Image (tube, rainbow, N blue to C red):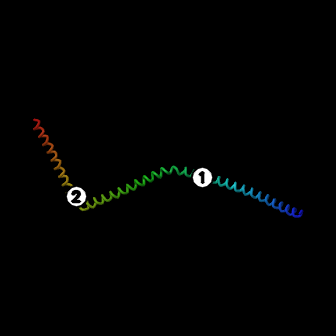
Amino acid sequence: MSQSIEVLNLRTQRDFQYVLKMETQMKGLKAKFRQIEDDRKTLMTKHFQELKEKMDELLPLIPVLEQYKTDAKLITQFKEEIRNLSAVLTGIQEEIGAYDYEELHQRVLSLETRLRDCMKKLTDSKNKKKEEKKKWKG
C-alpha cells in the first residue's frame, strides 16, 4: 500500500506541476489577449479620429459641390437656350437667304411707306377728332 501511495503521490506532484505550468501559460495568454484588445481599441480610436479629421477637411466642399450642381443646371439651361436660338437664327437666315439684297431693300421701302401711311392716317384721324370736338364745343 505504501508503494501505491508513493505512485499516487508522484502522479499528483507531476499533475500539480503540469497544472502550475498551464496556469502560467494561461496567465500569459490572458495578458496577451488583454494587450490585443487594448491595441484594437487604441487602433479603432486612432482610425476613427483620422476619419473624423478627414471628414472635417472635406466638410467645406459641400457648399462648393452644391454650387457646382446649380451651375451645371444653369449651363444645361443655357445650352438649351442656345440650341433654340440657333434654330431661330437658322430659320431667319434661311428666310433672308430666300431674298436677294434688292428684294429685301424693296420690302423695307414698302414697309416704310406703309408705316408712313399709317402714321398719316393716325394724324388725320386725331386732327379730325379735334375738329369735331371744337364743333361740339363751339
Instruction: Kindly identify the amino acid type of the residue bearing the numbered disc 2.
Output: Leu
Q: How many labels does the image show?
A: 2
Percent position (x, y) of residue 120? 15, 47
As helix, strand or loop, the secondary structure at mark 2 comes to: helix
As helix, strand or loop, the secondary structure at mark 1 comes to: helix
Q: Which residue is drawn at 61% across and 53% down?
A: 47
Percent position (x, y) of residue 89? 30, 58
Left or right, 3 with respect to 92, comes to right
Instruction: Kindly identify the amino acid type of the residue bearing the numbered disc 1.
Output: Phe
The residue lying toward the viewer, choosing from 64 and 103, is 64
Q: Which residue is drawn at 42% across and 53% down?
A: 71
The part of the image, by quadrant, that contains residue 11 is: bottom right
For marks 2 and 1, the one nearer the N-term is: 1
Left or right, 20 with respect to 91, comes to right
Image disc number at residue 104? 2
The residue lying toward the viewer, choosing from 25 and 112, is 25
The part of the image, by quadrant, that contains residue 39 is: bottom right
> Is residue 37 placed above or below 127 in the rendered structure?
below
Query: Closer to us: mark 2 or mark 1?
Result: 1
Q: Which quadrant is the C terminus positioned in?
A: top left
Q: Which quadrant is the N terminus positioned in?
A: bottom right
Image disc number at residue 130? none
The residue lying toward the viewer, choosing from 12 and 129, is 12
Which residue, given by chain and number where applicable, does mark 1 sit on? 48
- Can you name the residue that lies furthest to the right here? 2
